[in-house]
Image: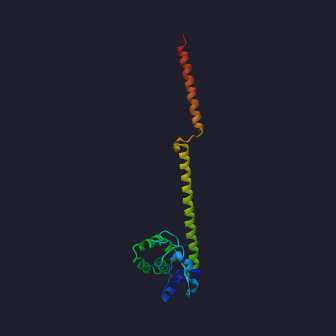
Amino acid sequence: MATECLSPSDRDLLGERGLSVVDCSWARLEETPFHRMKSARPRLLPYLVAANPVNYGKPCRLNCAEALAAAMHIAGFPSEARAVMAKFGWGHSFLSLNGELLDRYAACKDSKEVNIMNGRSISGIFLTVIFLQVIEAQEEFLQSEKESRGKGYDEIDLPPSESSEEEEEEEEDEEESAEKEAEETSKPS
């Protein structure tokens, strides 16, 4: 079994020995006899998202063509990766969906750097997902509060501000002054 991620340092190995993938169904992965497969230097792929019609949008659920293209791109064969994906109607989607990640992995020096970049990618995605979930929860809460009160946000019953109290006092003072004035003018002299 592979323990290292594929990296640009594998370019010469791919150029000399080629590249192979294990063709198996994700649904039957447990039945695949990996222990019987021989490989001089097995490699793992870092985090990427599938664009194939069966597993579109699923992390790490690449089909064989996507795996080959990803390995070629990371190892420094981007034109060959594009040629593989050009054979599929959805192939351009894989490269555009993962383009930034593929370029980041291809810019690494070795497997260790790819692992570090892979961790950063997953962490960033995880934090983005959490952030979006928090925002969604806040929006749901505000909507439920609005519905339960039967009022719009502008109609929420808030305590009066200091300026509101001052305005009321001024209005009362003006009314009292006007009443006194009216009394004095209505008194006979």
Quadrant showing the C terminus: top right
Count of numbered labels shown in the rendering: 0
Q: Residue furthest bottom?
A: 16
| Residue at x-position 42% and y-position 74% | 91
Is residue 168 depicted above or below 74 in this figure? above
Quadrant showing the N terminus: bottom right
Indicate left or right for 88 with 133 as reference: left
Q: Residue furthest top?
A: 189
Image coloring type: rainbow
| Residue at x-position 55% and y-position 42% | 156
For the residue pair 107 and 16, the one nearer the viewer reads as: 16
Q: Position of residue 35 (x, y in %)?
A: 59, 84
| Residue at x-position 43% and y-position 81% | 80
For the residue pair 103 and 86, the one nearer the viewer reads as: 86
Q: Position of residue 107 (x, y in %)?
A: 51, 76
| Residue at x-position 57% and y-position 78% | 30
Is residue 62 depicted above or below 10 in this figure? above
Q: Position of residue 34 (x, y in %)?
A: 57, 83
Residue 81's quadrant in the figure?
bottom left
